[in-house]
């Protein structure tokens, strides 16, 4: 053992002068036929199951990160599109790293970002006739609304609810997507009626279809097990003057409507029409969402580039260069981001040679020979995430633990923090073999005793134990540890102490001896990484 020292705003649509007169059926028949078409389509049942599975994942659950990773990796096409998106110019602004794995994408870009991007890509991939003009346009609107929602939530106190808001915005126009897919004639008639300006979208839907399209969306999302609060957010507020939302649910309803109606601003190039639409948005939503023209401009600008990249990754952008998002025929979508991408790539400062980040050889303990390089890369990734200021604490902790775990070849690693309510230290986040089982039982009293864990925290020294079975060391290992991890042989203990008060520790082990230990250079890098974790714990 050794220390290692009221203006109506039309919905997102296209020119509808080519509408086909619709044959009106009984409203129940139309709705039932749409539901039946969805149920019988070979693609959509799988889509609903996939959406339900991803929506259930929570960013507050450590296991969800692994589950999201496994799900994305199980779909080759989805994996490729997420990685393409992660390495695009827009997301390179978040991290200057080449992202080569889904795990790394989640850690660097954030769980919510990857989750909502995956939902958007699944929606596009699973939709039949997605290359039909009006279906593509509605899909573009859905993805743009979802991206706007993320930027809108970041401006409010609802940041922690960003994934719910994004899901609501993404699926807000699902009814129109399905109508354009299965009943294009009725879609043309309804949109043409709304475009005349005498009917709201809801009124046009009732007149042409005999029911609200929102009701169709709600029915399908219920079948797909989307949470009730997300579904309730799809109910549009009346066209009269909005009042300040009293709670989160009301805010989500207003936000979802705003995002849907602001979607035409994404990728639009007609500045005169943009100004008209922005004024209408501010008239309806400015007061309740605390929006001014400068704030709205900034919000749209931030959403614009990321929305473009998402559309390209979803295979929607290339085929839509000449199609319109806005109602008026003079408004066109521009997807000319190739030049921007090339310029950004040319100017990007690259500091890491990726070929040096591969594990070359390993010691018998499983520790990589190039541990220093791997640790340095982990520190750089964590530093970039912290510098962005836009990260969740659990993502940074997971990234740091993953870096230590991989760079030093551990079997199990965990962050253990003090729980003042029960006066104990208990594991909060972990990685490795049987990590959830070990994490559940990895806890011990905060009352000081003469064991390795308390001694390390009392003296604030980092311990590297090559062989925990040496008798003089074994005597200092507490019973709870030998019971839980009887085969732990080489152990690392990094106490987290602030103002001489222990707040917890980082624990890692292997079931093999580590005679090579940790070098001085590696020890310095380990301390830096530990310091980053402590800073994050004290600032987030």
Image (spheres, rainbow, N blue to C red):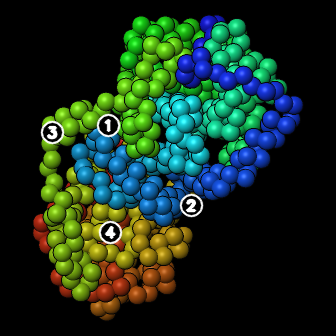
Give the residue displayed 47% in from the left and 72% down from the top: 435
Is residue 170 something that shows in the picture?
yes
Note whether 341 is above or below 111 in the view shown: above
Is residue 310 something that shows in the picture?
no
Note whether 302 is above or below 49 in the view shown: above
Give the residue displayed 34% in from the left and 49% down from the top: 84
For numbered disc 2, what is the local secondary structure? loop
Instruction: Tell me, for residue 90, which label it has, or none.
Output: 1
Q: Position of residue 403 (x, y in %)?
A: 30, 62
Disc 3/disc 1 C-alpha distance (Å) = 14 Å
Q: Are marks 3 and 4 in contact (CB under 8 Å)?
A: no
Q: Depth check: give the residue in front, 505 or 82.
A: 82
Disc 2/disc 1 C-alpha distance (Å) = 45 Å
Give the residue displayed 30% in from the left and 58% down from the top: 100
Q: Are marks 2 and 3 in contact (CB under 8 Å)?
A: no
Mark before the other along the chain sequence, 2 or 1: 1
Instruction: Tell me, for residue 405, which label it has, or none.
Output: 4
For numbered disc 1, what is the local secondary structure? helix
Mark before the other along the chain sequence, 2 or 3: 3
Please identify, in this view, whether the residue under mark 3 or under mark 4 is nearer the observer.
Answer: 3
Disc 4/disc 1 C-alpha distance (Å) = 30 Å
Note whether 290 is above or below 211 in the view shown: above
For numbered disc 3, what is the local secondary structure? helix
Please identify, in this view, whether the residue under mark 2 or under mark 4 is nearer the observer.
Answer: 4
Q: Are marks 3 and 1 in contact (CB under 8 Å)?
A: no
Q: Residues within 10 Å of mark 4 (few under 14, many from 20)?
A: many
Mark before the other along the chain sequence, 4 or 1: 1
Mark before the other along the chain sequence, 3 or 1: 1
- Residue that carries the numbered disc 2 in the rendered image: 422
Give the residue displayed 40% in from the left and 50% down from the top: 81
Instruction: Tell me, for residue 346, which label it has, or none.
Output: 3
């Amino acid at each position: 053992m050794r220390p290692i020292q009221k203006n109506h705003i039309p919905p997102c649509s296209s020119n509808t002068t080519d509408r086909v007169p619709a044959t009106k059926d009984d409203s129940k028949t139309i709705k039932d036929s749409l539901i039946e078409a969805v149920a019988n389509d070979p693609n959509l049942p799988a889509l609903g199951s996939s959406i339900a599975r991803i929506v259930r994942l929570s960013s507050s659950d450590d296991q969800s990160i692994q589950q999201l990773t496994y799900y994305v990796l199980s779909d080759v096409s989805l994996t490729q599109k997420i990685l393409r998106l992660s390495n695009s110019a827009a997301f390179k602004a978040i991290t200057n790293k080449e992202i080569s794995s889904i795990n790394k994408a989640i850690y660097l870009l954030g769980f919510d970002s990857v989750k909502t991007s995956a939902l958007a890509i699944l929606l596009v991939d699973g939709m039949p006739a997605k290359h039909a003009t009006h279906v593509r346009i509605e899909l573009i609107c859905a993805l743009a609304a979802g991206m706007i929602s993320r930027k809108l939530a970041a401006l409010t106190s609802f940041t922690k609810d960003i994934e719910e808001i994004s899901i609501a915005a993404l699926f807000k126009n699902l009814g129109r997507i399905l109508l354009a897919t299965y009943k294009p004639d009725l879609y043309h008639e309804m949109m043409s009626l709304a475009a005349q300006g005498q009917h709201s979208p809801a009124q046009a839907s009732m007149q042409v279809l005999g029911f609200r399209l929102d009701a169709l969306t709600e029915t399908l999302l219920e079948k797909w097990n989307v949470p009730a609060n997300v579904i309730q957010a799809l109910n549009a507020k009346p066209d009269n003057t909005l009042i300040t939302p009293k709670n989160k649910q009301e805010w989500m309803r207003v936000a979802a409507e705003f995002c849907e109606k602001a979607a035409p601003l994404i990728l639009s190039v007609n500045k005169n029409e943009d100004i008209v639409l922005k004024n209408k948005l501010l008239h309806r939503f400015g007061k309740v969402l605390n929006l001014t023209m400068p704030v709205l401009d900034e919000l749209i600008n931030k959403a614009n580039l990321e929305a473009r990249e998402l559309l390209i990754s979803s295979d929607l952008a290339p085929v839509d260069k000449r199609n319109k998002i806005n109602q008026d025929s003079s408004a066109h979508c521009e997807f000319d981001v190739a030049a921007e991408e090339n310029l950004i790539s040319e100017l990007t400062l690259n500091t890491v040679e990726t070929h040096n980040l591969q594990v070359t050889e390993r010691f018998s303990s499983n520790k990589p020979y190039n541990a220093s390089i791997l640790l340095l890369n982990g520190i750089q990734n964590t530093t970039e995430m912290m510098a962005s200021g836009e990260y969740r604490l659990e993502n940074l902790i997971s990234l740091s633990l993953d870096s230590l775990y991989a760079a030093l070849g551990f079997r199990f690693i965990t962050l253990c923090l003090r729980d003042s309510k029960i006066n104990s230290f208990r594991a909060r986040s972990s990685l490795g073999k049987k990590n959830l089982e070990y994490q559940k039982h990895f806890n011990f009293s905060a009352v000081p005793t003469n064991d390795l864990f308390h001694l390390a925290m009392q003296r604030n020294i980092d311990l590297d134990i090559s062989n925990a079975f040496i008798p003089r060391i074994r005597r200092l290992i507490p019973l709870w540890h030998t019971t839980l991890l009887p085969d732990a042989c080489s152990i690392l203990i990094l106490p987290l102490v602030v103002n001489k008060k222990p707040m917890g520790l980082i624990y890692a082990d292997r079931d093999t001896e580590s005679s090579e230990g940790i070098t001085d250079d590696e020890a310095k890098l380990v301390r830096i990484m530990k310091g980053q974790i402590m800073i994050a714990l004290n600032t987030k």
